[in-house]
Image (spheres, grey):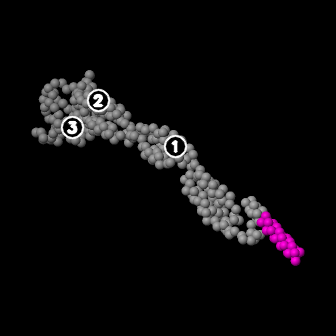
């Protein structure tokens, strides 16, 4: 306690520190003056309280702004009696046996705090919330008398760290790739087993630390889809239509160019997804054949401008036979006629 309100002519130089009845054992005494500092007074008189107006505390006292300064603790210990141990207190130095004013040991708490992961964003919100609560519950002002509470704080942090759970890995890309594969018609491809194998290789339940593995699964499916090859389109109808056209004698028709154009328009190498185009090619040939018009048959021998075909040789023989037959009949008629005339003449 510091006061200038005493009956003295020089109040500014008076101070009451204590009234001791025994032999003082403390060489230096520290008393809080205000929130800003402390006074150190060493002038003590045994057995009585008297004002020493000539006392000058300057050589042995100074204002202290930080009572937790280690220099104070050192000074106290240097001047302590044998067996007395000064230690750092909660608000000021105190004796080692003074558990109430001694700060609890927070070593275990600090060790636990050092174990907290640097990046807690990879853990679930629920488990992170428990950890944050344990950390926020730490009270750093407890005394040594409350050490069990401090130890419980450390254990709560340790338990919360152990209970941290990683977030699930993101399977968005995997699901998208699988949906893409499922949308395909496997019958359109030469070999779809690569895609099926990639999809079947997907392993669920990975956590965020295994995200690269999950992304690799998605990429494997995408790569398998990219490597797919369509089956070839079916040109059976096209080939049949072309064979049908080739069996025709274009000279029998007024205009065969439509068929020739349709045949030349055929494009090979189409795949199964282009089957409708291939079928249109076949139909174009069939339509061109159906639209053909035959030339009119010739009524005079030798007026046809086409060469005789295998099917026309019998007609030629028939014409020749008829020609000779008609000629023979004419000769026979002439002979008979003349004979009749002769007979008539001879009778006359």
Within the magenta stretch, is there residue 330? yes
| Residue 119 seen in render | no
The magenta-colored residue range is 320-348
* The disc label shown at residue 32, or none: 3
- Camera-side mark, 3 or 1: 1
- Location of residue 246 by image quarter: bottom right
Q: Is residue 39 left or right of residue 285?
A: left
- What residue sits 12% from the left and 29% below the top? 48
Other residues around mark 1 within 10 Å, as few (<14) / some (14–19) / many (≥20) = many
From the viewer's side, name the closer residue of 230 and 130.
230
The earlier-in-sequence mark between 3 and 1 is: 3
Q: Is residue 219 above or below residue 103?
A: below
Q: Quadrant of the C terminus?
A: bottom right
Quickly name the residue at label 1: 195
Quickly name the residue at label 2: 151
- Camera-side mark, 1 or 2: 1
- What residue sits 45% from the left and 38% below the top? 203
From the viewer's side, name the closer residue of 167 and 195.
195
What is the distance, in whole Å, between disc 1 and disc 2 at their CAs?
A: 57 Å
């Amino acid at each position: 306690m510091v006061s200038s309100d005493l009956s003295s002519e020089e109040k500014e130089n008076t101070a009451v520190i204590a009234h001791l009845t025994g032999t003082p054992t403390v060489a230096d005494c520290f008393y809080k003056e205000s929130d800003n500092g402390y006074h150190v007074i060493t002038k003590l008189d045994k057995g009585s309280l008297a004002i020493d107006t000539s006392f000058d505390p300057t050589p042995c006292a100074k204002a202290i702004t930080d009572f937790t300064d280690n220099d104070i603790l050192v000074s106290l210990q240097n001047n302590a009696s044998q067996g007395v141990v000064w230690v750092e207190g909660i608000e000021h130095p105190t004796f080692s046996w003074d558990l109430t004013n001694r700060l609890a040991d927070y070593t275990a708490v600090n060790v636990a705090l050092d174990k907290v992961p640097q990046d807690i964003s990879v853990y679930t919100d629920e488990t992170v919330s428990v950890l944050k609560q344990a950390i926020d519950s730490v009270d750093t002002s407890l005394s040594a008398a409350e050490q069990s509470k401090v130890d419980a704080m450390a254990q709560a942090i340790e338990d919360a760290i152990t209970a941290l759970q990683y977030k699930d890995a993101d399977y968005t890309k995997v699901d998208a790739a699988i949906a893409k594969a499922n949308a395909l018609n496997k019958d359109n491809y030469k070999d779809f087993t690569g895609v099926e194998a990639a999809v079947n290789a997907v392993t669920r339940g990975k956590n965020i630390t295994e995200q690269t593995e999950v992304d690799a699964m998605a990429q494997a499916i995408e790569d398998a889809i990219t490597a797919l090859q369509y089956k070839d389109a079916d040109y059976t109808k096209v080939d049949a239509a072309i064979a049908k056209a080739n069996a025709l004698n274009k000279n029998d028709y007024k205009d065969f160019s439509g068929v020739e154009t349709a045949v030349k328009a055929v494009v090979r190498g189409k795949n199964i997804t282009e089957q409708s185009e291939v079928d249109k090619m076949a139909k174009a040939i069939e339509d061109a054949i159906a639209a053909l018009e035959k030339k009119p048959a010739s009524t005079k021998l030798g007026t046809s401008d086409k060469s005789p075909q295998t099917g026309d040789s019998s007609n030629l023989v028939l014409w020749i036979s008829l020609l000779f037959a008609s000629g023979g009949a004419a000769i026979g008629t002439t002979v008979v006629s003349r004979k009749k005339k002769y007979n008539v003449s001879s009778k006359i």
